[in-house]
Image (cartoon, rainbow, N blue to C red):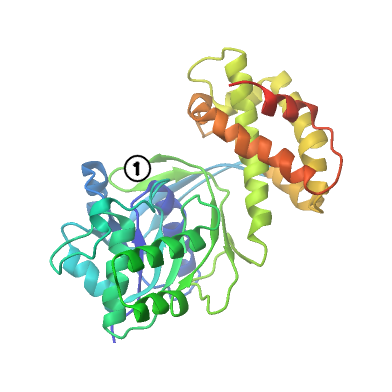
């Protein structure tokens, strides 16, 4: 029997400093972790250069730099959990063999448009044809696995999409139907495969060449419990939960809200183009105002939903992450798509709090949500 592997779709520095690093640390702790095979789904030459780094037996470095309880924390982990890197276009036959015979789990991080399907993939591919999109590839690979009579696979998507497992399942089963695949295959997708909803949280500030990354010490991979869910390894940063929404709210309405609040202040004051989150927080007036917004507007909003202790702890962690002396997170980058972000992060918070039936003033946040872009 072929030894199991974890197939990872996406070569991003985020996955290298998150899932791949977790797998390495689990191995170091004595767990038997299936090797990871990373798949490049695009033809981007820069990402293709990373594939060589993934096949190096010496592994690649992930440098963790930041603050923990106010103390500088810096360490380097040599990640050897990745066995090889494949190009879907160039190594399709190898990928098919692994997907059919060896894959136990499939991880993905394919970007904001990763579940989009081009017209060319809306028909089933020829036997010698490589689909263009991630969803096209995954549908074809799972179909071949089903044809071989193999058991289902556990999907662990890491895209920043609310209920990403449900979204990916809908995308793949919908595409299978559109392509005219067998009803028994669609049923197998629904019943034999596990589609986990997950939330990832770690700031990965820069890539290393040819592979590797620099990231903050903080990390979270929250995964929603469901029947038949099994994980390829355990790790202190992995949390199994029956209430994934709580983690999503904390990230969206504290970390992301704080970023957008800082970006709005930077824009209104005509700040320097290269100003960072860390520099903004070093300004006493900005820090005092943000502390007040968190304490007097954000925390009471979470309290209205019975989340006082969780929110208080996450606010403290978030402000420490913002002050990371190693992280150059430009406010100009955060300000991109500002109007939509404010509606989701701040307007959404106000609507969520109002939905609890509680009365929370939130003057600063309400003013920002109502401000024209």
User: If the image is split into quadrants, where does the N terminus sit?
Assistant: bottom left
Q: Is residue 108 left or right of residue 124?
A: right
Bin the neighbour count of mark 1 within 10 Å (Cα to Cα): few under 14, some 14-19, many 20 and up: some
Q: Nearer the viewer, residue 342 or 23?
A: 342
From the top left corner, tell me how far across and down residue 32 is, in percent: 44, 76
Q: Is residue 17 left or right of residue 37?
A: right
Q: Is residue 36 visible?
A: no
Please name the residue that numbered disc 1 is placed on.
208
**Rendered view: 327 above or below 41:** above
Q: Nearer the viewer, residue 54 or 354?
A: 354
Q: Across the whole image, how many numbered discs are drawn on residues?
A: 1
Q: Which residue ends up furthest to the left in the rendered image? A: 128
Q: Which residue ends up furthest to the right in the rendered image? A: 359
Regarding mark 1 in the picture, which secondary structure is present there? loop
Q: Which residue is rendered at x = 41% and y = 74% of the image? A: 189
Q: Quadrant of residue 361?
A: top right
Q: Which residue is rendered at x = 74% and y = 29% of the image? A: 366
Q: Which residue is rendered at x = 55% and y = 58% of the image? A: 163
């Amino acid at each position: 029997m072929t030894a199991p592997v974890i197939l990872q779709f996406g070569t991003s520095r985020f996955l290298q400093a998150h899932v791949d690093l977790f797998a390495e640390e689990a191995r170091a702790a004595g767990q038997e972790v299936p090797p990871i095979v990373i798949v490049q789904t695009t033809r981007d030459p820069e990402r293709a250069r990373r594939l060589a780094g993934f096949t190096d037996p010496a592994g690649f470095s992930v440098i963790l730099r930041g603050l923990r309880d106010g103390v500088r924390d810096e360490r380097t982990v040599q990640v050897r959990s990745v066995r090889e890197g494949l190009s879907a276009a160039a190594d399709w036959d190898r990928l098919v063999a692994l997907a059919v015979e060896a894959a136990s789990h499939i991880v993905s991080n394919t970007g904001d448009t990763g579940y989009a399907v081009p017209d060319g993939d809306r028909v089933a591919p020829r036997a010698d044809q490589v689909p263009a999109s991630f969803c096209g590839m995954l549908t074809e690979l799972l179909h071949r696995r089903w044809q071989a009579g193999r058991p289902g696979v556990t999907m662990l998507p890491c895209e920043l999409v609310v209920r990403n497992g449900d979204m990916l399942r809908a995308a793949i089963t919908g595409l299978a139907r559109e392509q005219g695949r067998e009803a028994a295959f669609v049923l197998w997708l629904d019943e034999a495969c596990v589609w986990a909803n997950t939330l990832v949280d770690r700031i990965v500030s820069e890539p290393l060449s040819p592979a590797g990354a620099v990231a903050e010490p903080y990390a979270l991979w929250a995964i929603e419990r469901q029947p038949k869910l099994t994980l390829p390894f355990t790790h202190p940063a992995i949390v199994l939960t029956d209430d994934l929404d709580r983690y999503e709210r904390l990230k969206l309405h504290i970390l992301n809200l704080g970023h957008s609040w800082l970006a709005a202040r930077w824009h209104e004051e005509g700040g320097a183009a290269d100003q960072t989150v860390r520099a903004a927080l070093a300004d006493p007036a900005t820090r005092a105002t943000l502390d007040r917004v968190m304490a007097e507007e954000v925390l009471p909003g979470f309290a209205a939903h019975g989340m006082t202790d969780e929110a208080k702890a996450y606010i403290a962690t978030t402000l420490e992450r913002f002050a990371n002396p190693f992280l150059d997170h430009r406010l100009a980058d955060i300000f991109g798509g500002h109007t939509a972000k404010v509606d989701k992060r701040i307007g959404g918070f106000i609507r969520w709090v109002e939905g609890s039936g509680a009365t929370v003033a939130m003057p600063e946040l309400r003013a920002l949500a109502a401000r024209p872009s």
